[in-house]
Amino acid sequence: MKKFLLILLVMSVGFQGALLAQTKTVTGTVTGGDDGLGIPRVNVTVKGTTRGEATNLDGTFSIQVAANETLVFSFVGYIAQEILVGTQSTINVVLQPDYAELDEIVVVGYGSQEKKEITSAVASIKPEDFNSGNISNPTQLLQGKVAGLSITRPGGDPNGGFNIRLRGISTFGGNQAPLIVLDGVPGADLGNVDPNDIASIDVLKDGSAAAIYGARGSSGVILITTTKGNSGEGVTNISVNTFATIDSKVLNKISVLGRDEFLTRGGTDFGSNTDWVDVITQDAFSYATNVSLSGSMGGTSYRASVNYRNNEGIVKGFKNERLNTRLNVTHNAINDRLRLTANINITNGSFGAKNNNLFDFALTYNPTAPIFDDGTLSQNSLGGYFQTLASSDFFNPEALRREQNFSGTNKTILASFRGEFDITDNLTVALQYNQDRFTGLNSNVWSKSDFDFGGPFGGVAGRSTDDRFTEIITGTLNYNTELADGLDATFLIGAERQEITSEGFGLQTRQFLFDSFGANNLGAGALATGPGTNYYSYKNANVLNSAFFRANLNFKGTYFISASVRSESYSGFGDNEKTGYFPAISAGAELTEIADLGPISQLKFRVSYGITGALPPSADLALPVIRNGGRIDLDGDANTADDQFIAPRQAQNPNPTLKWETKKEFNIGFDFAILDGKITGTTDYYTRNIEDLIFNIPVPIGAPNPFDAGNFNTVGSTWVNLADLRSAGFEFAASYNGLKIGQVSWTPSFNFTIYDKTTIEKLSIGDGLGFDDLRGGNLGSPGQNNTQIILNTVGETLGNFVGAKFIGIDENGQYVLEDANGVRGSSAADFALDDLAVIGNALPDADFGINNSFRYNNWDFSFFLRGSIGHDLYNSFRSFYENQDASTSAWNSVVTDKTPVVSASPTFSDLYIEDATFIRLDNLQLGYRVPSNSEWVENINVYFAAQNLFTITNYTGLDPEVRYTDGGNPLVPGLERRNTFIPTRSFTLGVKLNIK
Amino acid sequence: MIRYTKTTILAVALLFVAAACEEPVQEIFDGVTPEELANSTEPALIDVLKASAYQRIIGTWGGHNSLWSMHEVASDEMAIAHKGADWEDGGQWLRMHRHQYNANEQSVNNAWAYCYTAIGDVNLLIQQNPNVTALVAELRILRALVYLWLIDAYGNVPIVLETDTDPTPPTRTRADVFTFIENSVLDNISELSTDNTKTTLNQWSARAILAKLYLNAEVYTGSARWADAETQIDLIINGGVFSLENNFFSNFVTNNENSSENILTLPYDENNAGGFNIAQMTGHYQTQATFDLQDSPWNGYASLEEFYNAYEATDARRNSFLAGPQFALDGSPLTDDNAEPADPDGPGLNFTPEINELAPNSLRQAGVRVAKFEYRVGATPNLSNDFPIFRYGDILLMKAEVMHRQGNSAGALTYVNQIRSRAGIADLAMLTDDILLAERGREMFAEGYRRSDLIRFGKYNDAWWEKDASNPSVNIFPIPQIQRDANPDLQQNPGYN
């Protein structure tokens, strides 16, 4: 994008029309001031014209130019140089690296700014900083790279999504992750972009920067810009990147008893010796290939790419395959005053998945049980598998894996058309139209041999489709002017309409004669009503109309002010609450322009304030909508069908007073560069006040609905603007560029964030609705069904664990537990909830990332450490399975270095809340650039990457990664559930090839 | 030219901005609005809505964590013992058994929510159809039935009418609730049918509501109403619509809809009206093989030894239990491979009346299990047996009780002996409170009335197996904390905090 804009700039300037003069051929070489090597594809343009060439692989160029003309040498990451040709016929140029990159263009939402002008907290990440290895999701590129941006995926599910949190929790609703803006398309799905096609990622961190996205900006904004066609006239580039990855399981600190130990402990012996984790896992093989083709002709430049990925999970049957194709075309016309862009992306994916409870059962199933049994050993040998009726909570993991199959395909088309026209030199109008169509088709099959679900129903199969259609039209006017001497101003006014429509249907039938066709012939299932079956369809839509305005002022490159406001009107609120306003203001001063600060080459002080919003989880919460109640058979005789109906029933308690939740964020920060920009860094402190969080609160069921006169609460909860939260944090990032150790250049960088954890200020609204505290995190079966371990209290930090304190184990192997008043007991059930003390907190005190890159000739090496400090996790494996009481003869025990010998049955206490502070070698890469003398091959890079090489932690569960939600619920962080996918370690070997 | 273009583009842009400020309307594509519902001319709609209101009360009984669970586990009929961690569930069932329940119990809130969901639906439906007299009358009595459960379980509860607008309806005294139920039935009963409709309210079941209310009047209000109870009972008996089934279990089989004895039932159905899960709740994991059940049961509810032993060996009603060695459907003996080494019966599956302890390590096979309702071979977790709310057998015992209470024990005996002879056991020659209570226990086992019977007979606070004597304040359940959080005008019942 940066390059693209540079070219635009150069070309438009060039329009003034160059006089043809006597020309001559000038040749030369462009080398880098950092390593002395030739730089390929440097733009060599003749100033004031459209003429230009790009340097070859070795940095050489040749151009026709007149003596009175000036050549401009520019390249991303280097300080551009201008050289008057004069009498020279050979011009060798040394471009100095621009470490601080103050002229770098940063995308800020509906436009871009030079980095030096930015007055809010924005982080810009370029491909050279991206993580490497088997990266299938664009956010993985950023993991640990941006202070305040936490990207987590506990476990190793190839289909699993990432939890993205910017500066912690900003809403309880559906949009807890930052808004993704892909090439100007707000809300685009990350599945629409392949990591290989990304040119830059910009993260709008503070409220002021995000406020231009108004009601969708509360969780922050991540702007992704895809690579556009290159500029060199007639030059075609073909790039191929392919890699293969092997994943293997990592059971960091957790293990179970072997057969003999299990029997010694009194376990039931079924005569075999089975390592169930081994049975269900494999070393997974994944591969990906990306081919891109780019070039230009006339005023048109293009880039087309095809990406194919095939990821296999370490548990057999988990897989993910994706073909992603993208075409970006740009055409400039009318003397470059009209610029047209079309981006078209088509993604086809498919996945396979299994029951996630596999992981639980694989760890704890009886190690003496065989996989198969003819009925002599087990009480049930459905499908020829060993099954014991020990308890409804335990299933033969291999049978479960084989006999339940969940799969699907999805297709996405994202088409985006943009036109920009310079009405005058300083007034530009732009119109962008985006269409995003997603279609998913899912199939679920529980075979006739499935002991868990399918078998009892004679086999169950279902299929469902989901379609989502998003249409966004955006218009902007951009006006640049010099308001007074030295005071430059840019004004933006814009309007946007977004309409999202979702629809789908599904059918599940049962009682099949054959398993072989899975969900491909649902008509072969005899029953489509009753237990184990369902059928449905749905459709919903919502509209968001927005208008926005922004002014940027720049006084002599020293003082900067930016102010914006966005109005948002959302269909989903009540008539009087549809429109909200989201203003922001920020200011900055470049102190080095005011005074000479010696070795400090940049010191920009910034302060900003902005208000953003968050959309409710669904658009119909304000309305009394009547959907489906129970099935009614009026005469009770199933044989007569014409008197059977589905009763209408109000699906929710409408709240027409529902309004925007808002986040007010204050940010103060510095950007600095020292020693000619070799050391650069940025630091920010922010405070956030989140108000009127939209939340589903319990109301007296059956009582009159206070928000809708004459209506009664038909369900026990109503969506209201309830909670207020407060949080703050401190972020720091710095890097040292161009550090040399002999021939080796070393670039260390690190970032950290210290969180002032989210505090709950309020959990109530008028009329006494609301609560003093909210409990959550029920542990579940067996035995801990009524045990809620998270307590969120007004005035306290979010995510506190509560429970009894573990004092010891008595001579009978029973727990000795103690409550906050010093009263003792032996089981969690012995204590009143109100007497329990806070025994931990699930959210981290700090996150950090440390990167080190080394370059030596054609070699590069980097490693990246990442970690979180101060968060606690609930270790469900220990909590349920480390005990050695009588009941555990039915299942295996988990053994860790924290396992005490307890003969009591499992009960919850702080024994199972563990400090999960960790540091992880997340990413390591070794690359070699193979020198090429071929006239076709520009360069070849071979690389080896490893992910998740090791983790240092005292946590004894599967993965010490922070858990921000429990099944999407942000009020219940910190629970490592037993269905956590086994984490993996990956080794990747890849080749990148550029063909001329 | 440029200027003209510029003006045009600016004008278009401004129009676009203006359009973008328009407030969009929310469309609904997959539901109907209240207006559409009100304007519907579909003839079946009212019947469907009425049936839907009845369906709401189905959740109050029949499932785990329900009002039924509370009545049974808090009484001397059943317990849910802790088998190690299994069924520990935060100690709820231990506390329920020992009368130490608190306002945070899951079941206490579930039952409340079920009752008030039904009340909300009834109110909405009355409000939408104010002029359909018969419907309104029936709905008001349906609401009274729900209040009969509420007055019995919680005592002091808010009364919500279709005309009410207070979003936090305040607590009303148990006496107020009593009067409300009484008047609701008396004012509306004449509009109801006299047909034996069984699954919907009619005059007979409305009288049964009054009979139950008056029977417990002393508990609910402090003043006994035995004569009023007897009046209603006599009207039912003399109506001649109902009679005892020869076979006690005909009232509880899967296809019990033609029972001559059941007066009002909840018509559970595995396809249309699920929620009756007693086979899952009580069966051992292996009981799946006994009835070829579609899912493995949960090994929870078992009967108390003393309660089981109160049946004479020849009492037909003793088959209300699964006891002794257990067999698969094909007759082969069942074994529990995971039986505790300490189990004196060994791995062979044997439901012993004795339960070694309530917690923490009850044996997996200990305790006889509930089998009063037929478990159809191949049944799904949702049974299709209709659950009797009012049953003629109960009415006869109630008749006996009100006569006995009013001094006519001899007259009462004839009714008790009707019940005994149907069960195949000898007539009694004399009647005392204890004998009557025990007979009610044997007859009404697992039908959800034991707790209120014990309270009425003054026995609820006695000590029994694994339970100390309790304070009378536990004779009503606490108001659920979740509900009090949602409604600050709810007063907690005395003795709870």
Image (cartoon, coloured by chain):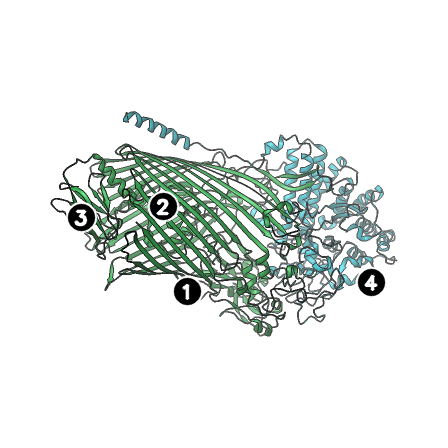
Chain colours: A green, B cyan
Q: In this rendering, which labeled residue sits more in front, label 3 or label 4?
A: 3
Q: Secondary structure at mark 2?
A: strand
Q: Label 1 vs label 2: CA separation?
A: 32 Å
Q: Secondary structure at mark 4?
A: loop
Given residues B269 and A250, the one toward you in this image is: A250
Q: Position of residue A695 (x, y in %)?
A: 50, 46
Check disc 4 and give the amino acid type.
Ala
Q: Are marks 4 and 1 on the same chain?
A: no
Q: CA distance from mark 3 to mark 1?
A: 51 Å
Residue A950, label in figure: 1
Work out whether A92 lies above or below A413: below
The residue at which mark 3 appears reads as A27
Residue B52 visible here: yes
**Total residue callouts:** 4
Closer to us: mark 1 or mark 2? 2
Q: Quadrant of residue A788?
A: bottom right
Q: Look at the numbered discs 3 and 1 and tell me whether their residues touch, using CB distance below 8 Å.
A: no
Give how far across and how far down residue A682 sits, in percent: 30, 53
- Circles 4 and 2, Cβ within 8 Å, touching? The answer is no
